[in-house]
């Protein structure tokens, strides 16, 4: 049992570590609320990778060239890999992948709302790479310096791959824009649909994001939602110009004074409705994941039963 | 060159079609590790297919479907996306639907055991490209076979349910097995020309490998008889199961909608 | 004429897409009588679709996709087989997968109750073709609705399992119901021009009919909220569910493979 | 109980009816072997209609024009209708549809082997209409005069629709032959695949068909397999010429002396292997039918439960 004095000392140590931008490691003492927040955030990130396999995975079968099929298959596979690292990071905090999968498919934990929008053309594969992975990178690069060690290290690896994906997505769109009129129209239509949901990926405006302050104090988060959103817009506008697509925001313009772009607000009612589960694909995504999990139950059981038999045989052999 | 092209199409189509099937598992596998492993296998096969289709196109440009003038679609994609199913030359084992995980594993076991034996010999092909593809591919296929064999044994020796499913899978696929060792005219000609391998010539050695896996699984060979063709025509002749047409309808849909598209 | 064409496309696509879904039941229905009845309903809807697509093409030839010169493909088929899914204007209720028999019946109940109310008013359209299609279609739709209502009551009052499935089906489809009564700009313009009907104007009457069926089934309306669109865009705007793309990939595969074909 | 004398009288009456080409009706006395043979033949015919829905039904979703989609959907629906009439004919002999469906999906009863060949292109829809329905008509027209009344009357209706289907199939092929080179190649390829299986539809050669004599004596069958096969070939050759397709039989030629065509024999080994269950699609066809039947069980149960409730309510109301 830890006495109150010990606890105060541990808390002080923890705060010092965070303040020095050092890492908290699995065996270090940490406040229960911190642990819970990290688990929730990492789990949500892991779920997003896994659910994020679906909207793009749906197009592997229809990829219009073998080269694009290989690129897409490898990308979706990377997402599964990211899910793996991240679930491993939660395991260092004593929460298993099975437990988290249960929370995902029962709706107890969330994933990024962007994946509740449908992918409706092959251009969407490019747009997801460009805008969605682009927004994810803006969110995630700072997380490489997040205070929880295993999470930060996973993020370093993930960010490297994500920026590769982003370039591939942008390159697909570039290629399509050099193609036929129909292809150019596909790209524009896709950007029209994904622009606003991409902006929503940074979460609600700062004044409607009550948890940000605590997460920043703990070094889990390092920038506010609106800061990251601004960074994303500023980064993306010149890319859109180079691509010859229009971003569907009449309020979007360069503000000389601020040295940044002004831009309109996404439809936050739509955002909350998607978060609450009424987005175009929420039910479908969860049902897909649940079906895969349920359909695989007998395989996981077989693997465990076989492993048990193996180990009891080797015990007998050594006995 | 026509023989070489036709032979490369056969081997390329085997890989392309099975890759397409396996990639259907993406986001649907029993656990993340298998999801990643199956995607990897699909990627390996896709890579083999691309090299072999490109070789076929180079060896015999007449084998490549024509498209509207000025179409930028490369040869490998013309072959993959602009042939009808009767022009596909894969064995039927590659095209049948995935079924459950046991059926997918069992198919992969049969397919990769057979293809590995072919590729080990093809590494000595007189065609340098085929030889190189085979040498690289053999390493990949050895991994695929080991993955499939490990899972087959696991399922066969796991729970009652998994054993039942493994046995059902083997029974369902067994009628497609003999087709893999029937020598098609193109294969015979390619073997005689020293660029290909007669599949009948690897039957005995494949059998030994498969027997080891079955023995470790305590599974006996099913009784099922070979699946007939139409007038003797089977996959290598372009006479497939109905499943291939549906698969290609999906696979080719975007490419066909944009015959002048760039991707 | 552009408004009339766009409006006819909406009504035509509703029928075409649902017809395609229902025809998937062919050889798969619970018994022969239902197999025949569902095929009949699919045929009726297909007939409505053909007339409406032809009317759209006649009203605005610019709406018809271009094909290689000399292609003999008629307008109705250009519209059905050579548009991408973002050009389809059907409500999303028509396109979602069939699910089980209960879901198919429930969708048909919702769809035909709504469409019947529209068609009864459209019989007075200023466009003589639309009026004639609607007058004939209303009779067909009345039969579809009665068939669906009878089965819905049967399932809801049959066994515990069938009741559970009927309730699940209603719950799953309910989020798609409000979209049917949202007035799209084209519908508003068509209504103002006297050729179309504002779907919002039939909401109350449709509700009464549906209530009778639910009451006879001892079923309450589900709580489910409307399915969001993207930035407010839904089926009528060409923003669909992912299911439509897969359905069209199959539906259009042969036609797209032969853009100069005659059938 | 029927005495031996009565039985002999009934048997004589039965034979006289058959000899006069009059119909045996459901309430008439008939030998048990005759009843069984009729049930088997009608059931096999009904099963063929139902299984025959699959190879063509598979193309409804992909029909390349709306007109062809409507034609095909209506045709497959007609086949379901034929199945219905024919199962009704077996019901007049005291065998229910459910019973026969069980026998079909357990493999205890057969259906026409032709449906164990795959349909691989849209041309196959035309070829099935032309050759398969054509062969079926050759088989079935004589059956309109078969000795069992309900069967004969069902056949009259069925034959009318079948010949309509045959014309539609031939017309599809004609249209395709006027189309592109690829379409012409599709038609020829399809005919190459279906020619021999169509010849097999008449059953084995007469010397390998031991049941024919008894069936002919009973008036269930009116021509031998080889007679019907010859009639089919003679009818089809000029149609093939008009269509500009080649029938894939090098031995096919007009025999002036016989006033008929000589032709080669199908591969009877393949025939027997398909009959025994090893055709390209036997397992698939049965699995499809079984799945539909099993998936529909809860619906049929619900309908029965609902009907029971209704009738017990109306009994209560009248009690």
Image (cartoon, coloured by chain):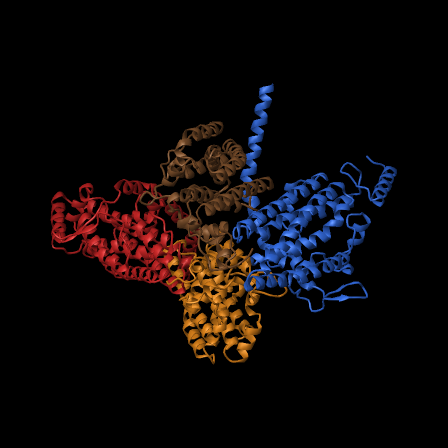
Chain colours: A blue, B brown, C orange, D red
Residue C166 visible within the image: no
Total labels: the figure holds 0
Residue D73 visible within the image: yes
Q: Residue at x 42, y 31 (%)?
A: B202
Q: Residue at x 54, y 52 (%)?
A: A63
On screen, D190 above or below A246? above
On screen, A301 above or below D5? above
Q: Residue at x 43, y 30 (%)?
A: B207
Q: Quadrant of the C terminus of chain B?
A: bottom right
In-image side of B191 versus C227 (left or right): left
On screen, A66 above or below A178? above
Q: Residue at x 69, y 69 (%)?
A: A250
Q: Position of residue C124 (x, y in %)?
A: 46, 79
Residue sitting nearer the eye, A92 or D247: D247
Q: Quadrant of the N terminus of chain B?
A: top left
Q: Position of residue D19 (x, y in %)?
A: 12, 52
Q: Quadrant of residue D56?
A: bottom left
Q: Position of residue B247 (x, y in %)?
A: 46, 50
Q: Position of residue B112 (x, y in %)?
A: 48, 36
Q: Quadrant of residue A230?
A: bottom right
Residue sitting nearer the eye, D278 or B116: B116
Residue sitting nearer the eye, C50 or C161: C50
Residue sitting nearer the eye, D201 or D97: D201
């Amino acid at each position: 049992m830890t006495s109150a004095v010990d606890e105060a000392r541990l808390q002080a140590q923890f705060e010092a570590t965070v303040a020095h931008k050092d890492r908290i490691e699995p065996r270090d003492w940490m406040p229960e609320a911190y642990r819970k927040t990290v688990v929730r955030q990492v789990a949500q990130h892991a779920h997003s990778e896994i659910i994020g396999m679906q909207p793009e995975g749906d197009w592997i079968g229809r990829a219009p060239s073998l080269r694009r099929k290989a690129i897409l298959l490898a990308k979706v596979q990377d997402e599964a890999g990211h899910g793996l690292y991240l679930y491993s990071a939660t395991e260092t905090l004593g929460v298993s992948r099975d437990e988290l999968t249960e929370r995902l498919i029962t709706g107890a934990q969330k994933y990024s709302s962007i994946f509740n929008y449908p992918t409706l053309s092959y251009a969407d594969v490019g747009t997801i790479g460009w805008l969605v992975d682009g927004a994810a990178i803006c969110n995630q690069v700072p997380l490489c310096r997040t205070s929880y060690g295993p999470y930060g290290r996973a993020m370093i690896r993930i960010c490297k791959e994500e920026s590769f994906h982003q370039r591939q997505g942008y390159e697909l769109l570039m290629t399509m824009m050099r193609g036929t009129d129909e292809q150019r129209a596909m790209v524009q239509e896709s950007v029209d649909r994904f622009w606003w949901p991409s902006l929503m990926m940074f979460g609600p405006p700062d004044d409607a994001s009550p948890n940000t302050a605590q997460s920043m104090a703990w070094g889990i988060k390092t920038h506010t939602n609106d800061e990251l959103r601004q960074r994303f817009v500023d980064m993306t506008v010149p890319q859109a110009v180079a691509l010859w697509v229009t971003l569907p925001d009449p309020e979007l313009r360069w503000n000389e004074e601020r040295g940044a772009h002004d831009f309109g607000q996404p439809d936050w009612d739509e955002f909350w409705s998607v978060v609450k589960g009424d987005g175009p694909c929420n039910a479908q995504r969860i049902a897909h994941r649940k079906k895969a999990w349920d359909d695989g139950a007998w395989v996981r059981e077989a693997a465990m039963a076989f492993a048990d038999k193996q180990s009891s045989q080797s015990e007998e052999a050594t006995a | 060159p026509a023989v070489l092209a036709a032979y490369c199409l056969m081997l390329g189509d085997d890989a392309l079609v099975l890759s397409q099937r396996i990639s259907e598992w993406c986001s649907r596998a029993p656990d993340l590790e298998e999801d990643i492993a199956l995607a990897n296998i699909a990627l390996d096969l896709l890579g083999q297919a691309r090299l072999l289709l490109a070789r076929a196109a180079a060896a015999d440009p007449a084998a490549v479907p024509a498209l509207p003038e000025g179409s930028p679609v490369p040869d490998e994609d013309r072959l993959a996306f602009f042939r009808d199913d009767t022009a596909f030359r894969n064995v039927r084992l590659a095209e049948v639907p995935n079924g459950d995980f046991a059926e997918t594993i069992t198919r992969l076991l049969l397919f990769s055991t057979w293809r590995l034996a072919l590729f080990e010999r093809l590494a000595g092909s007189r065609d340098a490209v085929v030889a190189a593809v085979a040498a690289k591919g053999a390493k990949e296929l050895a991994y695929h076979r080991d993955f499939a064999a490990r899972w087959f044994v696991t399922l066969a020796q796991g729970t009652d349910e998994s054993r039942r499913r493994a046995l059902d899978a083997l029974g369902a696929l067994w009628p497609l097995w003999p087709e893999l060792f029937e020598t098609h005219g193109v294969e015979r000609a390619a073997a005689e020309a020293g660029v290909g391998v007669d599949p009948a010539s690897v039957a005995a050695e494949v059998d030994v490998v498969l027997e080891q896996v079955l023995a470790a699984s305590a599974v006996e060979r099913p009784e099922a008889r070979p699946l007939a063709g139409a007038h003797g025509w089977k996959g290598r002749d372009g006479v497939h199961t109905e499943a291939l047409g549906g698969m290609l309808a999906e696979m080719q849909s975007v490419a066909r909608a944009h015959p002048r598209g760039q991707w």
